[in-house]
Image (cartoon, rainbow, N blue to C red):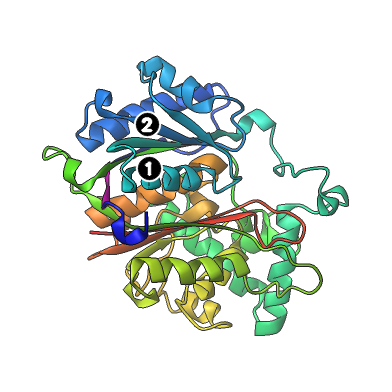
Amino acid sequence: MSRNNFRRVAVAGVAMSQFGKRPDTTLQDLGWPVVKQAIADSGFDRKQIEAVYCGSAYGGRLVGQRVLRPLGLLGIPVVNCENACSSGATAFREAWLAIANGLCDVALVLGIDKLTSLGGGVLPGQPEDHEVSVGMSMPVMYAMRARRYMHEHGISDADLAQVAVKAHKHGALNPWAQLRNEVSLEQVLNARPIAEPFTLMHCCPTGDGASAVVLCAAECVPASGRKPVWVATSHLTSGKYMTGFRDMTTPEITVRGAKDAYEEAGIGPGDISVAEVHDAFTIAELLYYEAFGFCPQGEAIQLLKSSATSVGGRIPVNPSGGLLSKGHPVGATGIAQITEIVWQLRGEAKGRQVEGAKVGLAHCTGGGISGLDHGACAINIFTL
């Protein structure tokens, strides 16, 4: 079936847990209340859910079934998806495709992970990957990107730290965020060093969290539910294997994915009202400003300093606080980004509301493998 023949799909309900470190809570007990809240928000009865798609990177086997069991929401297809940090967003795309192609009318998507179970520290890579085997980690990789970008475009340590200051300012307004404190430039610069030029506040925190959405076909939107938000497109791609020189200041997978997603949705960068991008590290947000066409290459720091990407600016980015402040429980992140965009388009984001938001973008990259920019990139665009 071509995209021209796809059925129109709406987000009918959303919910998420507060992100944070909850070592004494089981993954099951972290997830099922969020599923229950998303269904209630949608206006559907749980018996109307025809399929469930669950994204998790570190939850182990049968995550969806384990979370759904206390609700008695089984006996229907449950698809568990792993795609690193894009796991939740990948599950969302699978649900969207199923409804758009007429395989079901109503589906639930859950993103969930419990990273406190790993004991803390940097998330582990795959030991058979040769870069991982010689000490490459995600903070190191992004730090190298940061240093190259700073060298090419004359960016200072203080400039880069401003990304974290903005993230915490937004996160302080988000009751679901893991870190709800504003920070000063000096606090960011003087925090514990991680990988030059990064201090601790340049890096997103790990933690536990869950988020869920309910999707449905246009003809099934409940009259008693919330105002529907429409899926303009759901795009997923993988990284291209490239050996030799790579421009570390250009995230190839996101540049390519953004171009395709814009074409599928029939819009351009100037149409985006609000965006949630994968700011696992401060430099990433600047790179994604450019990848999505919010500014020309090399001008990201000027865009940031102009306050255009702050709430109240021309193109607010990460009003939730982003991964840097909201937190990054991997499998939950993509669905939490979507939840934030839905709240923004509904006008329900309260203290961090982007006024007049009509088009929202959620972007989640996943994983690091030698020779690939990233393993996966999911971009979802939503409209009223």
Q: Residues within 10 Å of mark 1 (few under 14, many from 20)?
A: many
> Residue 291, can we see it?
yes
**What residue is pinned by disc 2?**
51
Q: Give, as a single range, the part of the protein colored magenta.
A: 8-12
Q: CA distance from mark 2 to mark 1?
A: 9 Å
Q: Name the residue at the front extreme.
A: 1
Looking at the image, residue 257 lies above or below residue 39:
below
Q: Earlier in the sequence, mark 2 or mark 1?
A: 2
Where residue 276 sits, quadrant-wise, is bottom left
Between 377 and 280, the one nearer to me in the picture = 377
Q: Give the image location of residue 367, x and y in percent.
A: 65, 51
* Residue in the picture at 64% in, 79% down: 155
Q: Is residue 99 magenta?
A: no
Tell me which amino acid carries mark 1.
Answer: Ala
**What residue is pinned by disc 1?**
98
Q: Give the image location of residue 296, x and y in percent.
A: 51, 83
Tell me which amino acid carries mark 2.
Answer: Ala
Between 251 and 178, the one nearer to me in the picture = 251
Question: Can you say which quadrant of the picture contains the C terminus?
Answer: bottom left
Between 323 and 335, the one nearer to me in the picture = 335
